[in-house]
Amino acid sequence: MTEALVFRRVRAIDPASALDAEVDVVVERGRITRVGRGAADDMTVGDHVRVVEHAGAWLLPGLVDIHAHLREPGAEGKEDVASGLRAAAAGGFVDVCCMPNTRPVNDSRVVTEGLVAKALAVGGVRMHPIGAITMGQKGEQLTEMADLKDAGAVAVSDDGRCVTNSHVMRRALEYAATFDLTLIQHAEDHALTDGAQMHEGAVSTRLGLRGWPRVAEDVIVARDVLLAEYVGARYHVAHVSTLGAARILREAKSRGIAVTAEVTPHHLLLTDQALLGYDTACKVNPPLREAEDVEALRRALVDGTIDCVATDHAPHGVLDKHVEMAEAAPGMIGLELCLPLLLGLVRQGVLPLSRLVEAMTSGPARVVGLEPPRIRDGARADLVLVDPQARWTVDPARLRSKSRNTPFLGHEVQGQIAMTVCEGRVVHE
Ligand SMILES: [Zn+2]
């Protein structure tokens, strides 16, 4: 049995610890015990010491995803806890929060407890359930948030459905604040998006598809910011997709309101033009927007208006996607591709590397109150080793997820997860 894992002469990058240097990092008994130049000089490969030397590699804190759909219980053909956590480990994640829009909905202690037990039995990376805001995600009666939290939920959300009733939303914000649970809103005024299949704009007109206007997101974010300010509660916006929402959030933060937000890799990389070939893999909710939105979201992520990246990993099978646009289920998988895809923005000079690392580690951890993975003496050993030069092609046969619904199949990406370590255990390499 290996008692020590040594990363020798690796570029360790942890903005939260003001660390970006070539160092040795030593892991023993699940914790980081030494970080520093020459820190592992006295350690050699042996029965109990494994030394990892990977020229040019980066060592980052383990990644955190606060928005994934693992489809269990109820749709295990698309994904389950085991496959979802394998995909997460392959993507460099050590913490994954799973959304409650399952069958049954995770609106009770028993479902949350079942998920926690399942994840522990699987034994991969850590999973944290997100409970529903309202019973059955129907937008009416609040869940027993104290029970959900007690059972292991880290946040509440009706993701996939928006809490549209202002009274229910007010009570939900107050109730969640009582139990110190982050409330995550899927911001969509459903009255404005009925039957929508993509972003409302020139492309939807050209394709003859029903549009989902930006304002359906903006009106909810604006209202929620006002409610959060009024009741003095914390508020988080899932998958921000519009320039208007980014502007509202920037203003809210400048006034000291406790709002946070996330953005997905696909909203940072793709526009509604991707739908021109009627590719249902590009149907997501909220929809891919226009170049000016992408521009605004990138700027908001860089300047901290948007706190973090979240994958919105949404697995679907062939039967849900190889159908007409109107019938296709929205969503794409994201756990295994998130970091490699976003490293492209770093190479283009759009996003500083340190900001990307922060937005995938301490940023999301802070939003839901998880212990942020860190690279420093004494920290829990949650690490990801990245080869930033390695080029690889997204091959459906090699994905760990049970589903393949991503428009990036066959694309060449640069940057590969070489190893993921969770609490000192190698969970992927
Ligand atoms: Zn959503």
Image (cartoon, grey):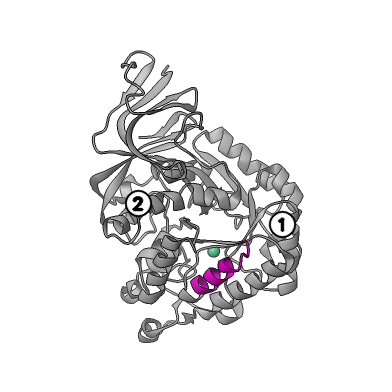
- For label 1, the SS is helix
- For label 2, the SS is helix
Q: Residue at x 42, y 48 (%)?
A: 401
Q: Residue at x 44, y 50 (%)?
A: 358
Vertical comparison of 305 with 129: above or below: below
Q: Is residue 380 left or right of residue 146?
A: left
Report crowding for label 2: few under 14, some 14 to 19, many 20 or more residues within 10 A (C-alpha): some
Q: Is residue 210 left or right of residue 274?
A: right
Q: Is residue 127 covered in magenta?
A: no
Residue type at mark 1: give it: Ala
Q: Main secondary structure of the magenta part?
A: helix
Residue type at mark 2: give it: Leu
Q: Upstream in the sequence, badge 2 or badge 1?
A: 1
- Contact between marks 2 and 1 (CB within 8 A): the answer is no
The residue nearer to you, when weighing 167 against 138, is: 167
List x then y, in percent, for residue 205: 39, 86
Which quadrant of the view contains residue 136? bottom right
Label tally = 2
> Disc 1 designates what residue?
176
Circle 2 or circle 1, nearest the eye: 2
Magenta stretch, residue numbers: 245-258
State how far apart marks 2 and 1 are (Cα).
34 Å
Q: Residue at x 44, y 57 (%)?
A: 317
Outermost top residue: 47
The residue nearer to you, when weighing 230 against 410, is: 230
Vertical comparison of 228 with 96: above or below: below
The residue nearer to you, when weighing 61 against 288, is: 61
> Disc 2 designates what residue?
353
Q: Is residue 257 covered in magenta?
A: yes
List x then y, in percent, for residue 177: 72, 56
Q: Is residue 218 left or right of residue 321?
A: right
